[in-house]
Amino acid sequence: MPSQHGAWAMLIAPYLLGLIATIADGRFELADVVLFAFWMVDYFAFFATSLWLKSRRKPRYFPPVRAYVVASSVLGLLTLVLQPSVWSWVLAFAPLLAVGLYSAYQRDERSLISGATTVAAACLMPAVVYADGLFDFFDGLGEAPYDRIALIMLACFGYFFGTVLYVKTMIRERGHLSYVVASVAWHAAFTIAAFLSRGLLREQLLVGDGVWLGLVLFFAVMTVRSLAVPMLWPMRGKTLSAKSLGIGEIFCTIALGAILIAAVV
């Protein structure tokens, strides 16, 4: 089972946001529940396979791979039966999966590229839940309901990939000023983008100023955090535990989720 506390927030939050948007539209099906089970077990299969590949396919790492791949396959087929259009998302997920597994095989699973692909996969989930397949999602863009889903995906990617950078400044790349600069720049860019999006949110997505202000404040706080926390701890030779960081991300995820829920209900 994945042990990273922050990963659970990244796995669950985008799916829940997509489900809430779907329910707000008056739609809810058994396929949505099975999809969640498939998504979670599929991630377990990915995690176990990554460890197996990283170990150069040592036999003792294979049993969980076998178990999770079989369970994931069964749930995937059931999801496909209940919602045939879900097959189209393979076109989006397959390249991300390939990059992630190749990075694990190269023992480079902690690279920024690998982190970006994992985050991107998680942030596709609102559209997977809401739309009737990949092509339906693209066809729907330009309409307020689908554009709000795109907003959720973009905001989630901005936050969760920013978390990848932030956590690196605290653990694996602590003491490296270049990563602090990159983390601050990333969060600042999303703060500016949120600030400039007021007209788009009101006129195209049909959401109120409360959502706009919430996004601006959220990313502004994340920007301050991305600078202040590394400067107060790693850059001064102090450390925070991975568990503390992960729990902190869960609370931040809840805050972002509350803002994005207000955009779709």
Image (tube, rainbow, N blue to C red):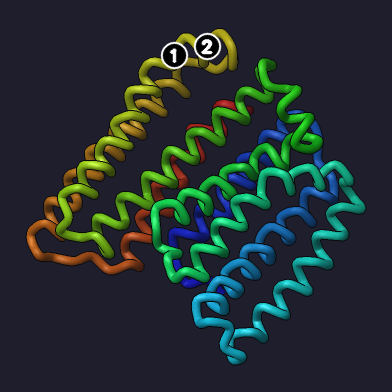
**Image check: 93 left or right of 202?**
right
The residue at the far right in this view is: 81
Residue on which the image places disc 2: 202
Determine which quarter of the picture holds residue 153.
Answer: top right
**Numbered badge on residue 198:** 1
Q: CA distance from mark 1 to mark 2?
A: 6 Å
Q: Nearer the viewer, residue 98 or 143?
A: 98
Q: Amino acid at mark 2?
A: Arg
Q: Residues within 10 Å of mark 2 (few under 14, many from 20)?
A: some
Q: How many badges with numbers are in the image? A: 2
Q: Secondary structure at mark 2?
A: helix
State if disc 2 and disc 1 touch (CB < 8 Å): yes
Task: Judge from the rendering whether residue 50 lies leftward or rightward of residue 62; answer left or right.
Answer: left
The percent position of residue 207, horizontal first and vertical second, equals 55, 17
Marking on residue 38: none
Is 233 situated above or below 207?
below
| Residue at 55% from the left image edge and 28% from the top image edge | 151
Please determine whether, in this image, residue 218 is positioned above or below residue 38. above
Residue that appears at 32% across and 60% down: 245
Q: Is residue 265 left or right of residue 182?
A: right
* Label 1 crowd (10 A; few <14 / some 14-19 / many >=20): some
The image shows residue 101 at horizontal and vertical percentages of: 57, 64
Q: Give amino acid for label 1.
A: Arg
Please tell me which residue is depicted at 45% across the width and 64% down the height of the picture.
Answer: 109
Place residue 204 in its image quadrant. Answer: top right
Query: Which residue is at a point 56% across and 76% down the rendered structure image?
Result: 53
Would residue 2 be found to the left or right of residue 75 on screen?
Answer: left
Near-viewer residue (82 or 183): 183
- Residue 238 in the image, given as x and y percentages of width and height: 13, 65
